[in-house]
Image (cartoon, rainbow, N blue to C red):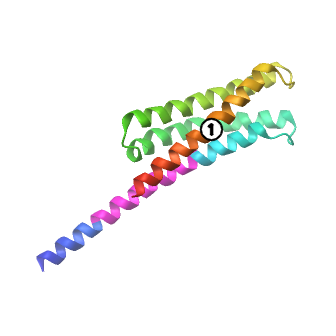
Amino acid sequence: MAKWILVIGIFMFLTIKINAQKKYIDSLMTVTTYLLDLKSTVNDTITPVQLKVNKLDSMVRLATKFQAIIDNSGKKVIAIDNVFEKIRNDFRFVIQSVILYKTDIKEQEYKISERLLQEKLYINKNIPPLVDKIYYYGSKAIK
C-alpha cells in the first residue's frame, strides 16, 4: 500500500513539473510569434508607411512584456546560462534595431535611406536565428 502511495505521489509530482515546464515553453513560443510579427511588419510593403510606423510603435511598447517573458520563462527552460544570456541580449538588440528603424523612417519623412535599409537588413538577418534558438531550446526542454 505504501508503495502505491509513493508511486502515485511521484507521478503527481512529475505531472505538475511537466505542466509547469510546458507553461514556460508556451510563454517562450509567444516571444517567437512576436518576433516574427515584428519582422513581417518591417517587411510589409503594402501598408502605408505611416500606419506601419504606428504599428511598430505599439509593438515596441509590447517589447518590455516579452522581455519579461524571456527573463522569467527563459531562465527556467534554457539551462545553459551563456545561451540564455545570448538569447536575452539578441532580443534586446533586435528591439533596439526596430526602434532605430522606426525612428529613421520618421526622421527621413517616410522616405527610404541607407540607414533604414541597414536596420531592416539587421532585423531580417537576426530574427530568424533568434527564433530558431528559442524553438530549439524549448523543444529540448520537453525531452
* Res 6 → quadrant: bottom left
Q: Nearer the viewer, residue 88 or 69?
A: 88
Query: Residue 76: where, in percent of width, then height?
Result: 38, 45
Residue at 80% in and 23% down: 106
Q: Residue extending furthest bottom? A: 1
Residue 28 highlighted magenta (yes or no): yes
Find residue 8 and report its image quarter. Answer: bottom left
Taking depth in this image into account, of 127 and 30 the one nearest to the observer is 127
Classify 10 Å Cα crowding around label 1: few (below 14), some (14-19), many (20 and above). some
Position of the N terminus, as image quadrant, is bottom left
Instruction: Find disc 1 in the rendering and name its residue.
Output: 127
Going 69% across and 45% down the picture, which residue do you hit? Answer: 37
Most foreground residue, 59 or 131: 131
Specify the farthest residue to the left: 2
- The quadrant of the picture occupied by the C terminus is bottom left
Left or right of 121? Residue 17 is left
Report if residue 40 lies within the magenta region. no
Q: Which residues are magenta?
A: 13-31
Q: Residue 45: x and y, percent? A: 85, 39
Q: How many marks?
A: 1
Q: Is residue 139 found left or right of 1 in the rendered image?
A: right
Amino acid type shown at disc 1: Ile
97 left or right of 53? left
Image coords of residue 62 (percent x, y)? 62, 39
